[in-house]
Amino acid sequence: MDEFALIRHYFSSLTDNDASIVVGIGDDCAQVRVPPDMDLVLSIDTLVEGTHFLAGTDPAHIASRLMGAAVSDLAAMGAQPAWFTLALTLPRADEAWLAAFAAALGHCARRFGIRLVGGDTTRGPLTLSVQVQGLVPAGRGLHRRGAAVGDLVCVSGTLGDSRAGLDIQLRPEVQPDPLPASSQVLLQRFFAPEPRLSTGLLIADYASSCIDISDGLLADLGHILRASDVGARIERRQLPLSKALRAYTDIEQARDWALSGGEDFELCFTVPAARWDALCAQLELHGVPLCCVGEILPASAGLRLEDGGVQLAESTQGGGYNHFAQGDDA
């Protein structure tokens, strides 16, 4: 099966009949129609075998992780998903692998309300890239810049779960057989991140800045601090931890993973203190919990970590995953 037959067979069905798609799969470029009074936002994510997932990982898990991670960037901008393109580098055209991957990709795309409009395939080490495009009202959207002294630092959902899911995979010899339900939840958090699209839309009128948590809370909050020229303090005891994570490891490890584990794809955002109560009033019917974990300080304070109000550390750069940091090999 050549490149063009592969695309037609496995991926052409992922393009819905939609008036916004002028030209989709099958031409040199996609052509889409952006509604009036809307801005287009774009982001790209890449997963590499051996770096972002282990060799032999179920292709359905790879697809859900790829789409969840990519669409999470749209959530962090307060954007509505619209279209995506896909680039696949494959060691070979394994039809069973492709069928499972395409089916899971299509399921995620329909659930997130995003349509495939083009892409590319080539031969090489297993590498997958998705570029996502979304829409925000013109001149609006959430950004990393905008946090101000006195703002509250907040997060959605729970933190550290994905890192625990990775730990389960890295240490199979110490896992019980069968895995308890709590460990299955942690694996699900690793393989199928849930982009907080509704949360991004909800906080858009309240938040002063926002980022999704891909490299760890400390590292990603650090991006907000640098973009906004401010500092912050984080209270370890306020970090939201799931029951599944607490069942898997001790409280200190859980908090460490919540701070620096990464790939939870929750939102970290700042809210002016005067607007927090108004935002909380909107949460009654919102299925994702939001939690305040600290506050924004002057830039001179750096990034302070506290435990019960006692300062533990001070850093101008939060720890987290960095693909090109010395010593990183996975």
Image (tube, rainbow, N blue to C red):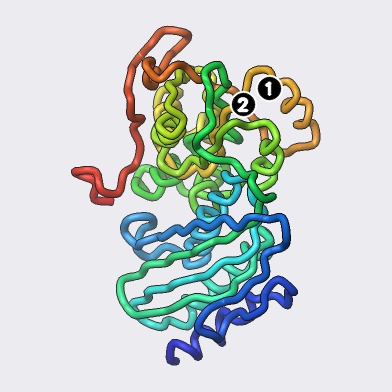
Depth order, front residue of 279/209: 209
**Residue 318, image x and y in percent?**
36, 30
**Label 1 vs 2, first from the N-terminus:** 2
Residue in view at x 58 percent, y 61 percent = 133
Distance between the Cα atoms at labels 1 and 2? 6 Å
**Quadrant of residue 282 within the rendered picture:** top right
Asked if the residue under mark 2 is in contact with the one under mark 1, i.e. CB atoms within 8 Å, the reply is yes
The answer to whether residue 302 is seen in the rendering is yes
Q: Say which amino acid is labelled 1.
A: Trp
Q: Quadrant of residue 223?
A: top left
* Residue 217 image offset from top left, x and y in percent: 45, 33
Kindly identify which residue carries mark 2.
271
SS at badge 1 = helix
Q: Residue furthest left?
A: 326
Q: Is residue 123 left or right of residue 280?
A: left
The residue to which callout 1 is attached is: 276
How many residues crowd around disc 2 within 10 Å: few (fewer than 14), some, or many (20 or more)?
many
